[in-house]
Image: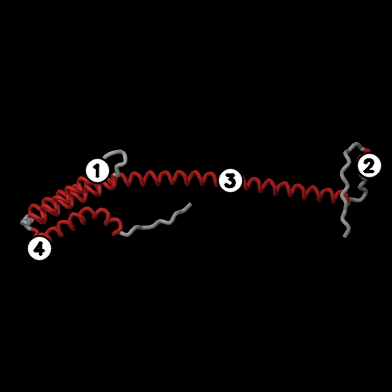
Amino acid sequence: MNEQIVARHWLAIITPKAAPALATSTVLILARIWNANGAEHSLGNAVLMAALALAAAAAGTFASIGAAGDPAIAGTAFATSGALAFAGVAGYADGLPLPLLLWVLATTAAYGLAVRYWRTERRERLAYERHTSERREEHAHVERVEALRAGAQIESARAGAQYAEQLATALLTRAALPGYDPAALTRAGLPELPEIEEKPA
């Protein structure tokens, strides 16, 4: 079975790879805008961001505890906690060296987690494609066997029909021969052949 090959656009290929850098860059830009609008050395803003970051980290901890823990929720909560802490420090600090250093660290950590996720996703996708290919080959083999079996049955039925037609033609031809006497054949010890009744025209 032939499947249609769909070529992905280059943006669709690059966007997932650039997502961690875009996310950390967006947080840095928003934090510096916030810094320029009064967050620099604002103790209240720093306390607020610290409280939000701690709350997100606590939510991630609770989401990852126990058998009912959800890794997706826990990962989202920890990522939110890190983003809030990064935004708080980048918004509170004066100058760019510390925010840029934090941006590099956050981007590196984000890519480290993303590479692990991409590797797992690629492994699962390859396993799924391999399984699908094996199932497709198995079904194709079954279809080929069934097609051969059906073809053999059709050929057998066709050969039987041809044999019956030839036998009937031979009987009619023999009965139409001059001097044909079924009684003489019976006297000679040959089995009696059934007489063919001709339908009235």
What's the residue type where badge 2 is placed? Ala
Alpha carbon of mark 2 to alpha carbon of mark 1: how far? Answer: 106 Å
Q: Earlier in the sequence, mark 4 or mark 2?
A: 4
Q: Which mark is residue 174?
A: none
**Residue identified by numbered label 2:** 184
Helix or strand or loop: what does disc 2 sit on?
helix
Q: CA distance from mark 4 to mark 3?
A: 75 Å
Q: Position of residue 22 (x, y in %)?
A: 21, 56
Q: In which quarter of the view is residue 134 placed?
A: top left
- Quarter of the image holding residue 12? bottom left
Residue neighbourhood size for the residue with mark 2, other residues' Cα within 10 Å, grouped as few (<14), some (14–19), many (≥20)? few
- Dot 4 or dot 1, earlier in sequence: 4
Describe the element under mark 4 as helix, strand or loop: helix
Question: In terms of depth relative to the viewer, which is nearer, 178 or 69?
Answer: 69
Three-letter code, disc 4: Asn
Whether label 1 touches label 3, CB < 8 Å: no
3D distance between C-alphas at marks 4 and 1: 35 Å
Please report contact status of discs 4 and 2: CB closer than 8 Å, yes or no.
no
In front of the other: 177 or 47: 47
Label 3, label 2: how far apart the Cα atoms are: 51 Å
Give the residue pinned by disc 1. 62
Q: Amino acid under label 1? A: Phe
Say which residue label 3 marks.
146
Between residue 74 and residue 143, name the one nearer to us: 74
The residue at 88%/38% (across/down) is: 190
